[in-house]
Each structure stands twice: as structure tokens, then as C-alpha cells.
């Protein structure tokens, strides 16, 4: 998995066709009275859920299409279209496309900034809440929400998914996410197959989807022959959406608590379970995992390091051997006391008590470690933490994330959900990925990524 450009040839559809042919993806419940399709940009609704929209219309369900942004930034260097003109054209394209798919559908344009949904997440949430309030007479169990996939490696798609997930969880609504750019940049190992479902399309539904996509002229054809007006969706990209089925990702398992765990929770956990409640000091599993993490870091010298959630400082000590400075932080008082005792002789280590995102330290970091911490954060706090990592990571720096994969009842999120959110950051490229039944380990860097061999001058 790496950063991508729409100009790349991308993953060929033949590969996906072979992969999908080997997999028997389950179908999903189509027993709903209201379908709400959220699109981060005009054309998302057609590409990712056009068949579903058509099916809902044929079923007689109520349909609402929410267009978060006008897609005015799709051609930032266009010499022929300013943002206002492009926004106007793209709105009209959506109206025409939705009319092909679901003639009775309501289309809601929110006009939020293209490329800036992270700054407008509250407005998106307010709009979705108001929409569901207007349709409050419908049983929540008979509402289906479809939104771009959080792991699509597009910031606006990730924000749309996170906001919709939150609202859907609060109201107990069914939610599906539809990949768009994932089909372009990903390979089969990058997708969460255990959460994927399929909708088999009829011949009529496929034809309606083709006709709807043809309405999005600004995306499937050049705006002009001048540089900056190139087409966005080349033929290879469009081919992903002419399948005989649409693929969706089900939401991560609902968690009983969606609030971040605070320092009091950790202090109480230590009080009940002793000085080493997770077995960091004694378990071979933990020793091996630390070794895997340290081996995955792509540089011998780690520079300035921020370790989020240092616990008793075992990993901190290994980081300090390769860093000129380590800022280690933990929320739990017993952990901070133990880490300070262990690392007192290390002049390049500072152990602080605090939690993210609220106590984020100043400055930029060459290495940021997010190990066994992300699932303690609520989706909104994880999103704020990701934003802070983006702002604090040095240009040639790296983020290493490692998390337990098995669900824990008290945790707001799963490790898989945390890594899916991290993988959705479009400005990061994957240096390496390690997948086991028990944990995930990802190393990210700002592109273009240099391999270890390239850094060593071997290639």
C-alpha cells in the first residue's frame, strides 16, 4: 500500500476480478425503508453505491443522497474552470446521475470545503443528525446508511466515514462503507475481507449505473485539452465500477463505550491487577513483539522520538539506544513512576504523565510510536491524534503503530479499526506491514518512501 495519484495506472481490474471470483462474499440485508447515501464528493454516490441506489428505488424505499462537498478542488490547476464554475457543473452532474438511479430521491448539497472535511466535521455531523431527525418516524432498524470507506486513503472519505459511523452508532442504524480509491491503489492484502459484503446487480441496474456515470462528464473526460484539465477517472479506474456486483465494507464491531479511557481508568486497572497488568515484563509474546517493532523501524538512528503510551518503559529503553532524544508519555501514575525509575540514568529520555490528544508535546519528531494505545481512544480523539501526528512528523520521519487485534469489551475501538484509520491518511505511505492473528504492525512515512536498501546505498 502506498500513496497514489489518479494519474497512476492503478491496480488492474483483472486482478480484482480474479480475487473476487475466488471469494464468496456474503450478501447483506436489503430490508430497509430509508437509504441514506453519503458522498464526500459528487460521483462517489454513483461509483460506489449506484447499484444500491437503483435497487432501493426499485424497491420503493425512501432515498436521500447527501453530497458533502461540491468537488470544486478536483482540478486545482485548471485554466478553464474556477472553483465556483466547477462546483456548479458538478452539482448539476449529480442531479442528473441520481435522477438516472433513483428518480424520486432527495439530494442534499451541504457545500462543505472539498479537501477540508476535517475542518467541517461538526457541520457534517449536524447535517446528518438533522436529516435523521426529519425522518424520525422510520424505525432505526429499517434505515441503511452508505458512506465512503474509511480506509480509502482520502482524507475526506475518512472523515465522512468516521462522522457517519458515529451518528449511526448513536442511533443504532445499519451502515456500509463503499471503497472507491481503494480499488485503484490497493492490492488484495490491503482490504478487510472479513468485513466485506456484496450486492449482485441485475443487467438493468448495471445499465442504469453506466448511464449515471456518463453524467459525471467533468470526471470521465478532460475539461479541455489544456494542461491542468486532464480527466480524473481514466478507463482503468472506471472499469472497477462496471462489475456485476457492488462491494461494501461493514462497520467495525460496535463497542459498548465510545469515550476515550482516562487516567483514572488506567490507575484503577493497575490497582486491581498489580505492577505489570499486561505482562510486559514477563511474557515472551511481549518481548517478541517489541523485537518485531524495533526491527521494523527503517533507520538505525531514530532522531527525536515521541512514544505515546510508554507503560513501564521497556520499549522506551530500546528506543533510547537508537535515539538522540525520547519523550515518553503515559496516562497512568503507576506506569510513569515505574518508567522514571527504570530510565533515571538515561539522559536522553524524558518521561511525562499525560494522554493524547490533549497533552501533545511541542516540536517535530523523526519517529512517533503508537503502540497498544489507539484502541483506548474514541474515534474523535483518534482523529485528533492523527491530525497531530501529521503536523508533528518530520518530513523524513516515520510513524510505527502496533496493536492487539482481539476485541476487549472495555475498549472504545479495536486494533483493526485503529489501523484502518491510519491507513486512510493520504499523505502517508506504507514502509512495511506485519500482520499476525494477534497483532498488526504498520510503519508509515511521508512519501516518497526510501527503502532500507536505498537508505544504505545498496540500490
Image (spheres, grey):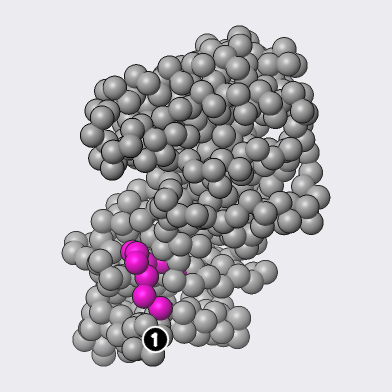
Name the residue at 34% across, 67% down: 448
In magenta segment, residue 439: no
Mark 1: secondary structure: loop
In the rendered image, the residue lying farthest to the left is 363
- Give whichever of 227, 99 is nearer the camera: 227
Is residue 206 shown to the viewer in this render? yes
Name the residue at 48% across, 27% down: 216
- Give whichever of 399, 74 is nearer the camera: 74
Quarter of the figure with residue 186: bottom right
Q: Quadrant of the C terminus?
A: bottom left
In magenta segment, residue 448: yes
Name the residue at 75% across, 16% down: 59
Q: Which residues are magenta?
A: 443-451
Location of residue 111 with respect to 78 vertically, above or below:
above
Percent of width and height locating residue 429: 41, 63
State the residue position of label 1.
Answer: 459
Percent of width and height locating residue 201: 75, 32
Q: Is residue 113 left or right of residue 232?
A: left
Percent of width and height locating residue 165: 54, 37
Q: Is residue 144 left or right of residue 412?
A: right
Location of residue 369 with respect to 347 vertically, above or below:
above
Percent of width and height locating residue 336: 35, 72
Amino acid at each position: 500500500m502506498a500513496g497514489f495519484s489518479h494519474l497512476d495506472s492503478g491496480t488492474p481490474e483483472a486482478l480484482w476480478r480474479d480475487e473476487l471470483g475466488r471469494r464468496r462474499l456474503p450478501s447483506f440485508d436489503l430490508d430497509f425503508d430509508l437509504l441514506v447515501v453519503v458522498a464526500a464528493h459528487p460521483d462517489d454516490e454513483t461509483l460506489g453505491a449506484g447499484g444500491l441506489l437503483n435497487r432501493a428505488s426499485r424497491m420503493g424505499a425512501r432515498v436521500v443522497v447527501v453530497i458533502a462537498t461540491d468537488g470544486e478542488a478536483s482540478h486545482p490547476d485548471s485554466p478553464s474552470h474556477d472553483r465556483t464554475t466547477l462546483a456548479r457543473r458538478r452539482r448539476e452532474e449529480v442531479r442528473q446521475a441520481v435522477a438516472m438511479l433513483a428518480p424520486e430521491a432527495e439530494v442534499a448539497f451541504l457545500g462543505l470545503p472539498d479537501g477540508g472535511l476535517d475542518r467541517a466535521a461538526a457541520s457534517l455531523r449536524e447535517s446528518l443528525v438533522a436529516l435523521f431527525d426529519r425522518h424520525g418516524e422510520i424505525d432505526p432498524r429499517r434505515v441503511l446508511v452508505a458512506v465512503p470507506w474509511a480506509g480509502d486513503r482520502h482524507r475526506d472519505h475518512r472523515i465522512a466515514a468516521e462522522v457517519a459511523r458515529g451518528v449511526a452508532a448513536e442511533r443504532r442504524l445499519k451502515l456500509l462503507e463503499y471503497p472507491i480509491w481503494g480499488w485503484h491503489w490497493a492490492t488484495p492484502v490491503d482490504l478487510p475481507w472479513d468485513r466485506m459484503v456484496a450486492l449482485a446487480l441485475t443487467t438493468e441496474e448495471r445499465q442504469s449505473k453506466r448511464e449515471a456515470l456518463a453524467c459525471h462528464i467533468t470526471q470521465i473526460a478532460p475539461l479541455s485539452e489544456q494542461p491542468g484539465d486532464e480527466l480524473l477517472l481514466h478507463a482503468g479506474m472506471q472499469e472497477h465500477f462496471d462489475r456485476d456486483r457492488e462491494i461494501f465494507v461493514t462497520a467495525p464491531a460496535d463497542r459498548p463505550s465510545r469515550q476515550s479511557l482516562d487516567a483514572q481508568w488506567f490507575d484503577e486497572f493497575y490497582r486491581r491487577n498489580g505492577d505489570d497488568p499486561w505482562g510486559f515484563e514477563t511474557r515472551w509474546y511481549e518481548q517478541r513483539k517489541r523485537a518485531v517493532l524495533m526491527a521494523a523501524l527503517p533507520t538505525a538512528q531514530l532522531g527525536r522520538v515521541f512514544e505515546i503510551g510508554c507503560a513501564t518503559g521497556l520499549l522506551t529503553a530500546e528506543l533510547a539506544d537508537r535515539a538522540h532524544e525520547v519523550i515518553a508519555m503515559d496516562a497512568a501514575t503507576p506506569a510513569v513512576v515505574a518508567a522514571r525509575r527504570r530510565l533515571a540514568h538515561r539522559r536522553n529520555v524524558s518521561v511525562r504523565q499525560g494522554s493524547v490528544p490533549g497533552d501533545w508535546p511541542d516540536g517535530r519528531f523523526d519517529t512517533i510510536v503508537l503502540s497498544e494505545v489507539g484502541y483506548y481512544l474514541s474515534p474523535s480523539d483518534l482523529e485528533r491524534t492523527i491530525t497531530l501526528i501529521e503536523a508533528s512528523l518530520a518530513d523524513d520521519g516515520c510513524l510505527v503503530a502496533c496493536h492487539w487485534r482481539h476485541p476487549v469489551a472495555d475498549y472504545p475501538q479495536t486494533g483493526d479499526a485503529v489501523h484502518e484509520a491510519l491507513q486512510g491518511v493520504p499523505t502517508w505511505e506504507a514502509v512495511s506491514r506485519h500482520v499476525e492473528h494477534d497483532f498488526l504492525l504498520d510503519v508509515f512515512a511521508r512519501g516518497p518512501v526510501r527503502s532500507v536498501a536505498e537508505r544504505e546505498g545498496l540500490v
